[in-house]
Image (cartoon, helix red, strand yellow):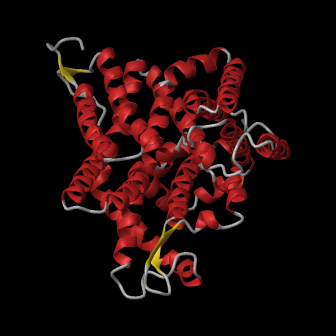
């Protein structure tokens, strides 16, 4: 990998002379930027997809303005950013796994850490949903309206199921990556194609759930390849050709009607086009690495990126409830809720985005403590056993998976609370004299 593309070395004397440089040593700031960009773009897209306002007659109108645009489907070929998030997640996970192994840790330590860091932020959200949906049910809110709002605000939770599953398998996938990187990618790609073919041939959509493994693990492995320098060793024209080739490969199956031209539709269950998007996005990220790295070395940019990045999961999980709340409040303010998709509606979106962003950052000041939950084992304690860690990971996985499959309702919110608490208890450090599980 060329020195100009890797950032400061961990052994760079300048990094140790300057505390700030030391904090940045060994980091790929472009990966940090990719994570932050993905989160911010998700917030913007959701903000533009939710239209609540009054029409000319004064009646409340609810719509999805962004999706109604004729260019929307084409834009998702670029704007569907979730594969890039998994690429970045694979990069950082491989770094964490290798560092952990060097310190003498193993897969139990790694999976415990991931289950805590991903499961803990979801617990207060499930508590919030259980209380709010429960109270709305008791006071007699229209069930159709309640279901619509709950489905919308809970939809981001699908990501936790997919990401936790992929991250929990990092130790295994890292071992396969070390031993047979090309074969691993080929097997994952072939598996995704077979699953999609079976889903398309039978019309049974749930068959596609198997691609939670094949598709997302493939994209996560791209992050491994990125970390090991494969993409950054390619010249820029080569990377552009790779990206263009990946996009072109998406055209025939979409034209044949096997996949939707809207890449958001192809998200759940995940499909082969997302693998191709992952390749294209990883290649373009590498092609733009030099200017993006220079951009990230500007202190104001770093400040914003690290602020958002340090609470990315909290922002991701809570932005939709805040958007819905802000939209509801605008209905109470004369003139603040123009008809969705009108000129006035589009012109007021930056203001709404600023308000939503300020509120989300404000509540994240308290909620980020769940994202930063400690994984340390205090003196006189020991980690939970392997069986407890696996059980806890399953408990953290089930609620967001249920949201993915059946959408959020009161029963699933309560299940999220119960299983979230169980996961935390199973992952807590044990007294040395406790049983091995």
Q: Nearer the viewer, residue 393 or 366?
A: 393
Q: Measured along the vertical axis of the image, is residue 99 above or below residue 257? A: above
Q: Quadrant of the N terminus?
A: top right
Give the quadrant of residue 199: top right
Identified at 61% across, 50% down, the residue is 264
Q: Position of residue 42 (x, y in %)?
A: 53, 56
Q: Is residue 334 left or right of residue 244?
A: left
Q: Nearer the viewer, residue 96 or 241?
A: 241
Q: Is residue 289 left or right of residue 347?
A: right
Q: Position of residue 109 (x, y in %)?
A: 37, 23
Q: Quadrant of the C terminus?
A: top left
Give the quadrant of residue 157: top left
Q: Position of residue 61 (x, y in %)?
A: 47, 74
Q: Measured along the vertical axis of the image, is residue 4 above or below residue 105? A: below
Q: Measured along the vertical axis of the image, is residue 118 above or below residue 170? A: below
Q: Measured along the vertical axis of the image, is residue 197 above or below residue 406? A: above
Q: Position of residue 110 (x, y in %)?
A: 41, 25
Q: Is residue 310 visible?
A: no
Q: Is residue 55 left or right of residue 400?
A: right
Identified at 19% across, 21% down, the residue is 430
Identified at 34% across, 75% down, the residue is 329
Q: Nearer the viewer, residue 387 or 155?
A: 155
Count how many numbered circles sit on residues in the image: 0
Q: Is residue 81 visible?
A: yes
């Amino acid at each position: 990998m060329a020195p100009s593309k890797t950032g400061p070395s961990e052994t760079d004397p300048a990094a140790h002379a300057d505390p700030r440089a030391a904090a940045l040593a060994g980091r790929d700031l472009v990966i940090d930027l990719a994570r932050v960009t993905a989160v911010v773009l998700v917030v913007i897209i959701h903000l533009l997809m939710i239209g609540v306002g009054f029409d000319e007659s004064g009646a409340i109108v609810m719509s999805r303005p962004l999706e109604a645009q004729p260019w929307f489907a084409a834009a998702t070929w670029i704007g569907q950013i979730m594969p890039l998030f998994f690429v970045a997640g694979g990069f950082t996970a491989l770094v964490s796994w290798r560092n952990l192994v060097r310190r003498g840790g193993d897969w139990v330590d790694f999976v415990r850490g991931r289950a805590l860091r991903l499961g803990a932020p979801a617990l207060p959200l499930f508590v919030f949903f259980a209380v709010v949906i429960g109270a709305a049910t008791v006071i007699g809110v229209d069930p159709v309206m309640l279901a619509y709002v709950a489905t919308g605000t809970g939809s981001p939770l699908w990501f936790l199921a997919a990401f936790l599953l992929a991250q929990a398998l990092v130790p295994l996938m890292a071992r396969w990556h070390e031993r047979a990187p090309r074969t691993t990618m080929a097997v994952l790609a072939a598996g995704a194609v077979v699953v999609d073919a079976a889903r398309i041939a039978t019309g049974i959509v749930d068959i596609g759930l198997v691609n939670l493994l094949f598709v997302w693990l493939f994209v996560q492995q791209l992050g491994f390849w990125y970390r090991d320098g494969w993409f950054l060793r390619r010249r820029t024209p080569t990377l552009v050709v790779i990206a263009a080739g990946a996009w072109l490969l998406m055209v025939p199956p979409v034209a044949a009607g096997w996949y939707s031209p809207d890449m958001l539709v192809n998200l759940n269950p995940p499909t082969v086009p997302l693998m191709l998007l992952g390749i294209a996005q990883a290649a373009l990220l590498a092609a733009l690495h030099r200017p993006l790295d220079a951009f990230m070395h500007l202190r104001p940019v770093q400040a914003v990126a690290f602020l958002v990045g340090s609470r990315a999961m909290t922002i991701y999980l809570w932005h939709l409830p805040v958007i819905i709340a802000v939209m509801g409040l605008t209905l109470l303010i004369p003139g603040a809720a123009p008809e969705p998709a009108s000129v006035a509606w589009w012109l007021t979106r930056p203001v709404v985005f600023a308000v939503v962003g300020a509120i989300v950052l404000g509540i994240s000041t308290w909620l980020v403590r769940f994202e930063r939950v400690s994984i340390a084992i205090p003196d006189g304690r020991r980690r939970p056993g392997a069986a407890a860690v696996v059980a806890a990971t399953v408990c953290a996985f089930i609620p967001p998976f249920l949201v993915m499959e059946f959408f959020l309702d009161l029963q699933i919110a309560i299940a999220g609370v119960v299983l979230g608490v169980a996961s935390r208890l199973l992952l807590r450090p044990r007294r040395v004299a406790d049983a091995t599980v």
